[in-house]
Amino acid sequence: MDNDLRSKAWPDQEGRLTRHNSLEAFSNLPPLRTDIDRSYPAALNEKADPRSMASTPTLEAQDEAKGGHGHDHHDHAGGVDIFDPNRPKLGFKQRLHHFTWAWFTLPMSTGGLSLLIFAQPHQFPGLKTIGMVVYIVNIIIYVTLAALMVARFLIHSGDMSKSIKHPREGFFVPTFFLATATLITSSDRYAIPKNDVGLVWAVQGAFWAYVVATLILAVGQYSYVFAAHSFGLQTMMPTWILPIFPIMLSGTIASVIAETQPAAAAMSIVVAGLSCQGLGFAVAVLMYAHMVGRLMQAGLPNREHRPGLFMCVGPPAFTALAVIGMAKGIPATASQNHIGMPVDLTTIRTMALISAIFLWSLSLWWFFIAVIAVVQSVPKYFHLGWWAMVFPNTGFILATISIGNELGNEGVLWFATGLSICLLGMYFFVLFFNIKAVITQDIMYPGRDEDVEDH
């Protein structure tokens, strides 16, 4: 019967594994009490105080200093406070053990910034050159992080499997694909000559490879999570959306590259992009229901994780951006012979604009919810989740620019320009604290990264 039960196991004092729901666990239970505390009904209506949920994890830092890998977040008497500035410093190899997939939120945000610079409605001489520099820097960051991740898996055997299966770090695996999506789109903007047939076809091949890979990810990762983990609603975090995010960005890639592709290929790309965008947004809406339920039942997340709420801004924003871009990407030669039905491009583009405005308003609502939540209780310690304050908001601003261009409204476009300046400031703000955290060993340190469960 044990094989049919999904449960967690932990070692007892003698090192043996025990199941918390095995039959033996019930043998020593005291008799069931029936005199329920009178205060119990009132307690049901009380929300947990997020501040009371925060604890100070400790660890056996001596084990890490010796090269051990197994004491990331245990609370032992005599352990070392991981938030103590005077805690033991670790070497590069030990810190590399805690180099998580969440690091790819950095090239995600940098790539998004390069796209935002390219799309600015109010250009000045040299702005595109700045965008090109950001694009090249993003490639360097992406390659460097990929090399460090490979080094982690080679030096610390077993880390790759553990990282993918981990109930928290596993949800950040899709950030690698999101960073790849920004590289594909920014490469099309900055590096692919429109008259180079070979490179245009290379972009098309990259798109289809990305669609296949992210579809496998979306189905495979959620299937594993459903089978291997059991999460309570009160633990719901926006990172649960991440496995569906990469395939959703297939629509965003399609909206960028469709205009540069041959007519026959462009139609296929638009249809595939629309399908992927629809799948991604539909699953995101299902996750929104859980997110709102979690906020209603358990309140806002712990202050250290509230920046992650900005992830909820992304799906409607990128969908708004994609539907406008894909509508514009439909080739003018599209006719009944191509897709089996009459195509009125004016009507399609009008419906795309209406849908985009509808979705943009939902993104705006989540943006304000996240801003208020973060301002109410500002995080004290840096986490890589802070990059959620950059990348999803990039999609929001890009969608604003697309809507402003379609409406021909200068007020909307100047509003987007103002938001772009704010986002640039936020990017450097997060980047500063990211670099500082690396130097002071506030991240890539036992108990301080996404390879521990702390919410």
Image (cartoon, rainbow, N blue to C red):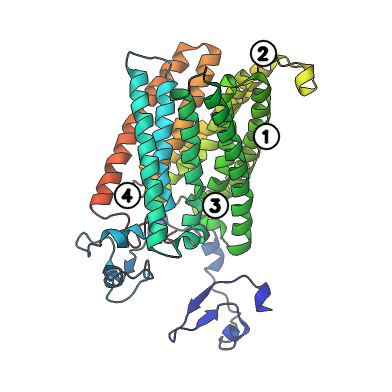
- Using the rendered view, name the quadrant where residue 116 is placed: top left
At mark 1, the secondary structure is helix
Q: Earlier in the sequence, mark 1 or mark 4?
A: 1
Number of other residues with Cα within 10 Å of mark 3, as a class: few under 14, some 14 to 19, many 20 or more = some
Q: Earlier in the sequence, mark 3 or mark 2?
A: 3
Number of other residues with Cα within 10 Å of mark 4, as a class: few under 14, some 14 to 19, many 20 or more = some
Instruction: Left or right? Give the position of 86 relative to 203.
Output: left
Mark 3 vs mark 2: in front: 2
Q: As shown in the figure, which amino acid type bears the numbered disc 4?
A: Phe
Q: As shown in the figure, which amino acid type bears the numbered disc 3?
A: Arg
Q: Which residue is mark 1?
A: 275
Q: Earlier in the sequence, mark 2 or mark 1?
A: 1
What mark, if any, has residue 294 been given in the picture? 3
Q: What residue is rendered at 65% in x and 25% in y?
A: 265
At mark 4, the secondary structure is loop
Q: Is residue 197 visible?
A: yes
Q: Which residue is mark 2?
A: 332
Q: What residue is rendered at 63% in x and 25% in y?
A: 355
Q: As shown in the figure, which amino acid type bears the numbered disc 1?
A: Ser
Mark 1 vs mark 4: in front: 1
